[in-house]
Image: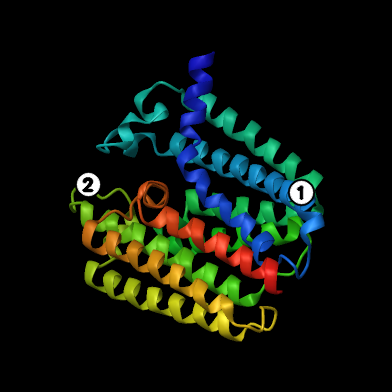
Amino acid sequence: MIKVLLSILQSSRPKQWVKNFVIFLPMVFSFNESWFVDDFWEIFFTSSYAFVGFVLISSSIYLLNDSLDIRLDQNHPTKKYRPIASGELSINVARISSVIIGLLAILVAFFIGIDFLVAMISYLLIMLGYVFLFRNVFILDVFSISTGFIIRVLSGALAIEIPMSNWLYICTALGALFIALSKRYSEKLNSSNSNETRDSLHNYELGKLKFTLVIISISIAILYFAYTLLAENLPSNNLMIFSAVFVFCGLFRYLYLVVYKGKGEKPEDIIMKDIFILPVIFVWLMYTFAVLFWFR
């Protein structure tokens, strides 16, 4: 029984739970505007419940995805060691677990609020569309991933019932598109035509992907800088401008690792293991929170 539970946990891909931390962005950027220091624990715990809800719903999707992809994963050099592909976890147990975990996620969302529940169900439908159709359709595959990130951020705002800057929605959308295209670039770079596992991958060209990644990264840098300079809800002393330095460093480090090292296939590994990016993200968040605490 313990072995089965561990296999279910492994198939839930704990490394990828890091993606759900974007749910906390509305909490950080609305500090001293929509909520204040006295409200911290209430806001933090509500955002944490929302995080748990999306961990559950994304785990449900991963279990379903792996149960459907078993044949492809068995022919993949690394994915063949996943519990379902290796036979450690049966397809039926994986699918039953997927349904149970998905229902738990819906239950968590219900207790957070109806708006949050609607957002989570929207995310679920898009991800189901991705699993069954969109991932094999050129462009729709990356746009569905990007939409998933936008819904996460929106859900974080809905959970704590605060408005979110349109600037940050746009930056999140472009950032998610950047990560999704980086993943496709690395998959294409690291694959031969004989072992590509995605139908949509045949339609991507390395040269065009590289050019697109550079353009998107520059666009993100410009938009975030514009946000720190022009957003009306930020401190008038313009100290938020300096937070752009951390964004630029992390963004272009990520671009370097993708284009020159081919590491974009596992964005969670880049974020959690790179000795440069993770500290930069941490300092960016601390600096942003400090500026909003003292000057807004």
Q: Is residue 200 visible?
A: no
The quadrant of the rendering that contains the N terminus is top right
Q: Earlier in the sequence, mark 2 or mark 1?
A: 1
Disc 2 is placed on an element classified as loop
* Whole-percent x, y for residue 16 in the image: 47, 45
The dot on residue 41 is 1
Q: Quadrant of residue 200?
A: bottom left
x 61%, y 50%: residue: 124
The quadrant of the rendering that contains the C terminus is bottom right
Which residue type carries mark 1?
Trp
Mark 2 → mark 1, Cα distance in angstroms: 49 Å
* Whole-percent x, y for residue 106 in the image: 72, 43
The dot on residue 19 is none
User: Few, some or many C-alpha atoms within 10 Å of disc 2 (few <14, some 14-19, many ≥20)?
Assistant: few
Residue carrying label 2: 195
Residue 41, placed above or below residue 215: above
Seen as rendered, the residue at the extreme top is 1
Disc 1 is placed on an element classified as helix
